[in-house]
Image: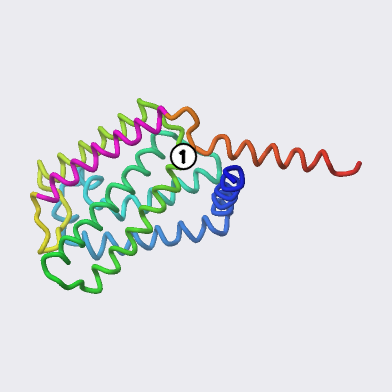
Amino acid sequence: MLASLAELYNRVRLWVLTPSIVALIVAIDLFSFVVGCIFWYGRQLPATPWWAWVFVPDCPLFALLGGIAIVGLLTGHRSSLFESIVAMGSLKYAIWTIVAWVLYYAEARTMPLVGVVMIVSHIGLAVQGLFILSFVRLDAVVALLSGAWFLLSDYMDYGLGFHPGVPSAASLPWMQWHTIAVTIGLTLAFLWMARVPINLWAGAWPVLALKKEARLSTQREPA
């Protein structure tokens, strides 16, 4: 049963990494980046010093970086640190956005269409982050460097005031401490995954099992 699930798990992952599916994902990520930067950060970016731009359009940027990371998985141009940062950022900012809109609903008792769109799209961002994470070769250094980057990002957002707009019914101080807690929690989770003896998230043993199966099938073919 476990072997069957592992095989299905990897067949789905390998199906996603086909050129046509990757092209579709990249197109969606690029569209999300452009629309997000214009719609959500269109006023904030021009008022932000250029050196802080990388810390401002959180979700659109990590959607775009997610597409780049998936292209890297397809082509073999990979970096464990880059993939780890993209996966952590995708999860972090997806959680931030979903929580912000849930808090908005809890206070306002209504959910505008933009809130529904944001929640659905950021569930997709989280799924993309988990997909990338399933390929990352984590170690303690990569996990700690990823966490350090997002602690710096949190300082830029809430220490220097470059945080994204918060739905009016959501509490900014609560969101500040929530996002720092998410950074710490994700860093600890990545550190734990780096210590797992058989890292299911990295997909090492299932991929090798599929290659072994393909090799055995070839050997069984008549000469």
Q: Secondary structure at mark 1?
A: loop
Above or below for 38 versus 1: below
Q: Would you say residue 193 sits in the magenta stretch?
A: yes
From the viewer's perspective, is 135 left or right of 2? left
Identify the residue under disc 1: 201
* Label 1 environment density (alpha carbons within 10 Å; few <14, some 14–19, many ≥20): some
Residue ID at (9%, 53%): 172
User: Principal SS element in the magenta part?
Assistant: helix
For the C terminus, which image quadrant?
Answer: top right
Above or below for 130 versus 80: below
Q: Position of residue 186 (x, y in %)?
A: 29, 39
Circle count: 1
Residue ID at (58%, 53%): 15
Please state which amino acid type lies under the numbered disc 1: Trp
Residue sitting farthest toward the right: 223
Above or below for 195 versus 24: above
In front of the other: 31 or 217: 217
Which residues fall within the magenta stretch?
A: 174-195
Q: Position of residue 91 (x, y in %)?
A: 32, 48
Residue ID at (24%, 68%): 115
